[in-house]
Amino acid sequence: MIEQQHAVVTGGAGFLGSHLCDKLIAQGYRVTAIDNLVTGDTRNISHLLGNQNFRFIKHDVTEYIYIDAAVHFILHFASPASPIDYLKLPIQTLKVGSLGTHKALGLAKAKKARFLLASTSEVYGDPLVHPQPESYWGNVNPVGSRGVYDEAKRFAEAMTMAYNRYHGVDTRIVRIFNTYGPRMRIEDGRAIPAFVSQALRGEEVTVFGNGSQTRSVCYVDDLIDGIYRLLLSDEVMPVNIGNQSEISMLQLAKEVIDLTKSASKIGFRDLPEDDPKIRQPDTTRARTILKWEAKVDRREGLLKTIEYFRSRMQ
């Protein structure tokens, strides 16, 4: 009889972590989700709580992680991930990126498990190279307000590679670009949740700066597929996962207003400190190594996201 594979997902009640739990359960894994619920929400995993292959542990991963079972995969997704969160929780963000990564890697070493780190396009900072390939070292302000997230993730990558080289831990690193979809929090603070919730309420849709800054937004189903392919690949070095279709924030706001059929007008606010002016992944490595590329059309993804927000706001 083949042993059922056991995966541990830190941040498992979060936006991405919960979708990852769904994917792993669907693929036949036994899943343990760990989350301290600072930004996670048990509603994201409530549909899994009766599943015999799913277990939830409320725990802060900056503390020692104990799992009394064989573990084959550890996916480290615990961290505040939106500016509104990591500006409000700067110390916790730094701790989960450093101490939390250390504890999760320690568990991987002890269990001889494969470890996948959820890193971010924020390691590139306000990029001077466009689009951003994995070989680009980034342009990050370590003492700026956003540095708590950027440097936590850069440290986490360095720690992951150190465990790979020094301890021989089998590691993977995914650099996640802007992602959207159901289970994002209404008060998340990132562009799409803000635009959608404001448009649905008929409020002014707020755009920072003049709206010319760009992002490449990837629907969550595409992203999770890419992460799963990376998990099962042999690639140790970082891989960008994101949608290559670039859009300005002003155009995105207009699309959301159109799709929600809202009467909202657009208002402009001062650009936050160190807000990247451009952001687009070079996904050559993902296409070549993982045979992956984003497939969900932005209109389709936005309509699904709008429907989710509409249901949550009733």
Image (tube, helix red, strand yellow):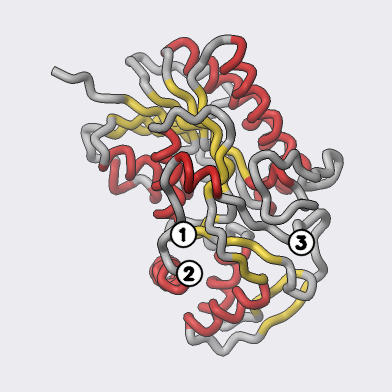
Query: Which corner quadrant holds the N terminus?
Result: top left
Q: How many numbered marks does the figure carry?
A: 3
* Residue kind at label 3, given as amino acid type: Lys
**Which residue is at 44% across, 22% downward?**
114
At x 62%, y 31%, the residue is: 96
- Secondary structure beneath dot 3 equals loop
| Residue 134 horizontal/vertical position (percent) | 64, 41
Q: Give the residue number, with chain letter if any, for mark 2.
A: 298
Residue occupying the far front of the picture: 288
Q: Nearer the viewer, residue 192 or 131?
A: 131
Q: Which residue is mark 3?
A: 277
Tell me the kind of residue under disc 1.
Answer: Tyr
Q: Assess disc 1: are there few (<14), some (14-19) or many (≥20) residues with their C-alpha within 10 Å of its C-alpha.
A: many
The residues bearing labels 1 and 3 have C-alpha atoms spaced at a distance of 21 Å
Q: Is residue 313 visible?
A: no
59 versus 217 height, above or below: above
Residue nearest the observer in this picture, 162 or 190: 162
SS for callout 2: helix
**Image-quadrant location for residue 167:** top right
In space, the residues marked 2 and 1 are separated at their CA atoms by 7 Å
> Which residue is identified by label 1?
219
